[in-house]
Image (tube, rainbow, N blue to C red):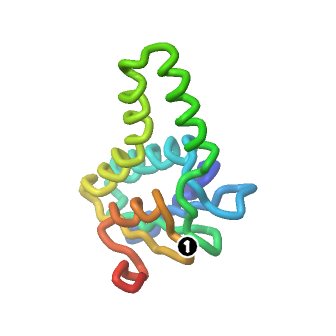
Amino acid sequence: MSTYRNFTVETDADGIALVTWDMPEKSMNVFTVEVMDELEAILKQTVEDAAVKGVVFTSGKSSFSGGADLTMIRGMFAMLAEEKAKDPTTAAQKLFDVAGRMTGLFRRIETCGKPWVSAINGTCMGGAFELSLACHGAWPPMANR
């Protein structure tokens, strides 16, 4: 079992890694820079481990996720203002690169070569919904949402 601050990863005898998202001190899981860093490490860990045949991504809370942390989004716009003051010609590209990080991470999940399933319980909004769409399957099926 691997433990991160916001996730635990347990691989069973059949090679299925259960990734449980459970942010401490939060009533709901949300995307933060730290969550993206950990998710990136988990993706690398599961892809490189030949014993892992597939991944099930779930929440340890009563709801899956509310999406992105609003303070993270506010920080991105503060960064844009700072960058515009330094160099207005590159500021928009820097914001695009930061905002596109989640999309790149989700694309790597989609194309990593191992099946990922999103086991959704309760609310699944914003980036969490995008994560679930990047997975190869979801439970309950998206058609039922």
In the image, what residue occupies the spot 47% across and 60% down?
126
Residue 79 picture location, percent across and down: 54, 28
* Rendered image quadrant of residue 129: bottom left
Residue 2 picture location, percent across and down: 55, 52
In the image, what residue occupies the spot 38% across and 74% down?
138
In the image, what residue occupies the spot 36% across and 52% down?
106
Q: Is residue 122 above or below residue 109?
A: below
Residue 107 picture location, percent across and down: 30, 51
In the image, what residue occupies the spot 41% across and 79% down?
139
Residue that mark 1 sits on: 123
Residue 143 picture location, percent across and down: 34, 83
The C terminus sits in image quarter: bottom left
Q: Is residue 99 above or below residue 53?
A: above
Q: Residues within 10 Å of mark 1 (few under 14, many from 20)?
A: some
Circle 1 sits in a helix, a strand or a loop, which is it?
Answer: loop
Farthest-out residue, right: 25
Q: Is residue 86 left or right of residue 46?
A: right
**114 vs 72, nearest the viewer:** 72
The N terminus sits in image quarter: bottom right
Looking at numbered disc 1 in the image, what kind of residue is underneath it?
Thr
Farthest-out residue, bottom: 144
Q: Is residue 61 above or below residue 80?
A: below
